[in-house]
Image (tube, rainbow, N blue to C red):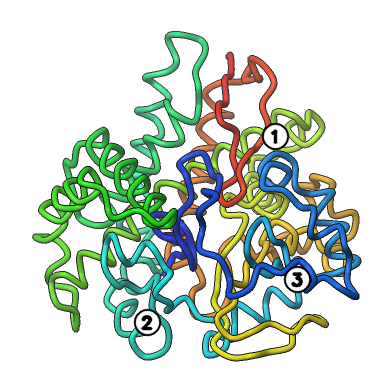
Amino acid sequence: MRSRHGGQRGPPRRGGGGSRRDGTRPRGHARAARDDPRRNEGGDPGSARVTLEALDADPHPLLARLRASEPVAWVPALGAWLVTRRDLALAVLRADATFTVDDPRFSTARVVGPSMLSLDGDEHARHRAPFAAPFRLAAVHARLGAVVAEEAERLADAIAPAGRAELRREFAGPLAAAVVTRALGLDGADTAAVLRWYDAIVAAVTGVTAGRPVSAAGREAFAELRGALLPVAADAGGLDPDEAVSNAAVLLFGGIETTEGMIANAVLHLLTHPEALALVRADPGLVAAAIEESLRLEPAAATVDRYATRDVALGGAAIGRGDLVTVSIAAANRDPATFPDPDRFDVRRENARQHLAFAAGPHVCLGIHLARLEAQTAIGVLLERFPGLRLAGPAAPRGLVFRKPPELRVVF
């Protein structure tokens, strides 16, 4: 769970803002200081021809080429340096003094206010600390294990009579929304209302990123959300009420977007790899491993953004102060230096958990344990309840920032 992806990109991206609900980045996304394609001189000239459409549809062949030839490439379509090698991705994510989220271009903060998502250093630690204890492993399982199981079974009951479902909107999304609202103390919250707030606030963030003022719909949605969150978030130690609400908001929305994608992608990988599905059905103990391998192969949050605080050299590139640096989690997770045969879905891969799907460094996903619990429970329930589960038609992940199938229609 990443409130982007504390849990980082908010709402719901890590380290940046302004993605559309379908996972694409608006063309008005904040540009780095210079868009001069001559910055690619000496590198792979193909990086100047990278399009948002290619990154949205099937980015992996393109990312592999960049990783091999120019692991830090200036991409004019992004207005950013694109980091594709795992070791360099880790270097960026761990160095918050050099690669920061605390920048005026961070559009999420302009909609929901400063939060752990948009701060670094001591302020980031102050905003994150009050929310850390409830999201630790033991606390998550003790407080939410039964909630997750009950909600997954309830949703399975709801789709069972029809013999078919669109799993994103009828199972994965509602499960993620229901669980994270409970995690934040919003017992009895209307899941449909939460999803409406989510869509309106994400649209407002997208508009701000494109240079427009915060929309009236976005302001209204955040006001309603604030009213719901204030009674349960106001006692967050060390934070004033507005700070507490802003942090709860990014956790709420991060817990919806990325967890929904995590579940949908795992189902898709299993249903398109019959041999892996057979292994997992024969040994349910492999469910957790299958989810980690799915996260590696197709992370729900495919990119995170940082801003350079000074001129810095990285991977042979001369990054200027103020430049936007986009870390491709999707590319880092398929780095053959760490993951042999990286394009293969292998539920027995021994080092799958070395993926960066939950980021790394100070902004590592706060909701990592809850996200894993939800995904493992969801996949376990689906496989147990629906032994004939199969795709009803073609499906493939899409999205530059958030990657998941636009629809996941199944029959059972």
Image-quadrant location for residue 120: bottom left
Q: Which residue carries the number 2 mark?
A: 124
Residue that numbered label 3 is attached to: 86
| Element carrying mark 2 | helix
Give the SS element for disc 1: helix
- Neighbour class for label 1 at 10 Å: few (<14), some, many (≥20)? many
Mark 1 or mark 2, earlier in chain:
2
Mark 3 → mark 2, Cα distance in angstroms = 24 Å
Tell how many labels: 3
**Residue 408 left/right relative to 231:** right
- State the residue position of label 1: 270
- Toward the top, the furthest residue is 162
Residue at point 67%, 77% (across, down): 90
Question: Callout 1, which amino acid?
Answer: Leu
Label 3 sits on what residue type? Arg
Tell me the mark number nearer the camera, choosing from 1 and 2.
2
